[in-house]
Image: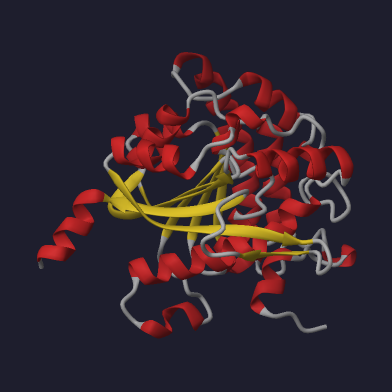
Amino acid sequence: MRHTLFQRCIVGRPRSQSQRLAPACRRVYAGCRAMTTCATQHHASVQTSIDPEEIQRFRLLADKWWDPHGEFKHLQLLNRARLKYIRRVATEHFFEEPEASSRGAPLEGISVLDVGCGGGLLAEPLACLGAHVMGLDAVELNVHVASQHASQNLMADQMALSYTCGTVEEVVREGSTYDLVVASEVVEHVADVGSFVQSCADAVNTNGLLIFSTLNRTFLSYAAGIVVAEDLLHMAPQGTHTHEKFVTPTELSDALARAGFHMHSATGMRFSPRLQQWYLADADLNVNYIVAAHRAHTQSSSEHS
């Protein structure tokens, strides 16, 4: 069976091929085992925005990330909308050619840090689109799951993808920066939104891009994101979200501004129960939304050039 580029990014190898791992991915997985031990030891000595209760919740679900019928099924479905947005804004920001977004590897050469990558649901397809991706997660088991799945990807030998266990604060302390920093469905789980946004911003290159996706704090988001999604339809495990920790677009924009970034794009994301798929909803930011921001001086410079 032939696969499109997108399909090759998200499906695993047939079971008969699962043991034939690409040498590069074996090295990535071995490296991850070493790095997770090291990174975990640093958590106590580096101040972070991590919420320990949230970390424990996701640690218990670590083996469910890629289960098509499991607790993260709808996060998997959300990928198509997230990738469509990231692909569009990233190609507009980094490339001048209009055809860049339609080429085979539209993110080729772009370095990406996926903060709170979980099991690699977003990091892996971003690598398939040509980006050089570092997946970062504070849960060691998540890193193992992500690494194992990547090693079984049909494009494993073509992906520039690695994972490490740690926090974005540790990345900043080490002085590492990236063209694109993504934190998808993470900011509503941290202990200090302002500190987390600042650290993500500090990890972005001078002319880079920062992307967040999260949930707005509205009555509709409580009804749809918690009552319906968790309690009634079981689209996510009960207790996954706390409504008080949802972040409004204004609060996120203000946090970005304090970090020296300008939020230049915001788009809603809706789920269609009938079609069983997520789609971008432009101005509807009432529940799920995704935003992009660049350094404020970058916009000023371009306006005066």
Camera-side residue of 110 and 93: 93
Q: Residue at x 73, y 49 (%)?
A: 148
Q: Outermost residue toward the top? A: 44
The answer, for residue 24, to whether it is visible in the render is: no
Q: Is residue 67 left or right of residue 281?
A: right
The picture quadrant where one finds residue 255 is top left
Residue 300, above or below 29: below
The answer, for residue 133, to whether it is visible in the render is: yes
Q: Is residue 122 left or right of residue 76?
A: left
Residue 113 image offset from top left, x and y in percent: 47, 48
Q: Residue at x 50, y 68 (%)?
A: 87
**Viewport quadrant of the N terminus:** bottom right
Say how the picture is coloured. Answer: secondary structure
Q: Residue at x 67, y 59 (%)?
A: 270
Residue 133, above or below 230: below
**Viewport quadrant of the C terminus:** bottom left
Residue 260 image offset from top left, x and y in percent: 26, 41
- Counting the numbered discs, the total is 0
Q: Outermost residue toward the left? A: 304
Q: Is residue 226 left or right of residue 267?
A: right
Residue 144 image offset from top left, x and y in percent: 70, 40
Residue 64 image offset from top left, x and y in percent: 81, 43
